[in-house]
Image (tube, helix red, strand yellow):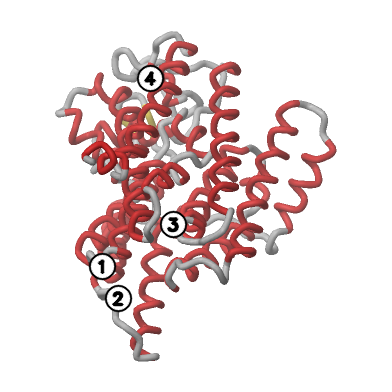
Amino acid sequence: MKSRTWLNSPVVPAIIIAICYITFFVLLLRARGGDVSLFVIAGGVNVDASKVPPGFTVIPNIGGYDGIWFYRLAINPFTSVQAAHGIRIDNPPYRQQRVMYPLIVWLLSFGQVTWIPWLLVIVNILAAAVMAGFAGAFAKRFGLNPLWGVIVPLYPGFVLTFSRDLAEIVTAAFAMGAIWAVASRRNIAAALLLTAAVLTREPTLLLAFALAAAWLIERLLHRERRIGAITFSLPIAVYTVWQFFLTMRWGLSPLRAGAPARALPFVEFARFLAAASFRRDHQERLYFLESLFLAAIVIVIVLIWRRSRAPLEWRLAWLGYLAIFSIMPHTIWIEDYGFLRIFADLFLVSAALITPSNTPARWFTLLISADLWYYLAKHIVLAW
């Protein structure tokens, strides 16, 4: 009896996902010669190899990637200096608004800079496991086996973000926790988790707005009041204060500093899909496969929309994220590290709709996500 109870626990998907990510990490670390600092992908004009901390590897002849800024902020998350430790922050207000991931690493490092490259990876592994646990607990709320919780952290884009010390996994862990807490009517926990998610990556603020809209509709239509005002008011308030603080510090609003260009809905996606389908090289075929995955997830949601037991707030959030994703500019569609990162929010909410649906969509989503996750993990290890 105890054995069966344990198997019906959200701990099980957490352990499974931890094993998956640890295995991927070990293989990729070996491929990278045992140098964990290579996960940062440090390089480019904003990095001075002669001034970086000891043991930190700068890769020559590359432009670097966003992991540089998370590493730099993990040394001092509240820095007011643009250039330090051999790294110049290219867009300080925009980068520093995403403070939670480096803040966690900074707290765990106890001032030991040499620990930071390891902790950036370890925190992502733990976040993936926590995400699976929250997703399993969410599935259990609908009478399902918690093992369905593996769907969310097996999102293929997380393989890419994990390999470069990015914040999407930590964001999704907090956001999935907030989704579970709302379903469990734990308003304070939901507010705190969603606030942490917003401070990790600001697009999760859309979840707060969706909760606010659902809260208002409940009251206008005199429905059962499930959502506490604090679940959306706290993250919105903290986000506003943090934005004001960064604007005063850097003289530029993070919203203005990071505002991307926009395109007509789905135009750039259609162009990308058409271009990738006619290319014969391996990379373009991979992009085509990934774009089909994105389209498949959206189609699945459309097909199960009426049969899902997911509440109004996550349906509103899904529509919002789809609208945002549809107008992403051409620059997002240059490589999968761009469009799969952006789609992560939409996939998370898609999982919140798919999990409570009494359809084969759960199996379909699990299988295609897990297959592509494995394929990308293998591709990254072999390509290094």
Residue at mark 3: 203
Of marks 2 and 3, the one in the foreground:
2
In the image, 37 versus 63, the foreground residue is 37
The residue shown at (29%, 76%) is 226
Q: Residues within 10 Å of mark 2 (few under 14, many from 20)?
A: some
Find disc 1 in the rendering and name its residue.
185
Which mark is first along the chain, 4 or 3?
Answer: 4
Whole-Å distance between the Cαs marked 2 and 4? 45 Å
The disc, 2 or 1, on the residue closer to the chain's N-terminal end is: 1
- The residue at which mark 2 appears reads as 226
Mark 1 vs mark 4: which is more N-terminal?
A: 4
Compared with 257, 335 (above or below) is: above
Q: Which residue is mark 4?
A: 37
- The foreground one among 376 and 135 is 135
Query: Circle 2 — which element?
Result: loop
Asked if disc 2 and disc 1 are in contact, CB closer than 8 Å, the reply is yes
Q: Quadrant of the C terminus?
A: top right
Please tell me how crowded label 1 is: few (under 14), some (14-19), or many (20+) other residues with Cα within 10 Å. Answer: some
Residue 194 figure quarter: bottom left
Q: In terms of secondary structure, where does tag 4 sit? A: helix
Q: State whether residue 153 appears in this view.
A: yes
Q: Tell me if residue 299 comes above or below residue 285 in the rendering.
A: below
C-alpha gap between disc 2 and disc 3: 24 Å
| In this view, the mark in front (1 or 3) | 1
Q: CA distance from mark 3 to mark 4?
A: 27 Å
**Amino acid type, label 4:** Ser
Q: Give the structural element (helix, strand or loop) at label 1.
A: loop
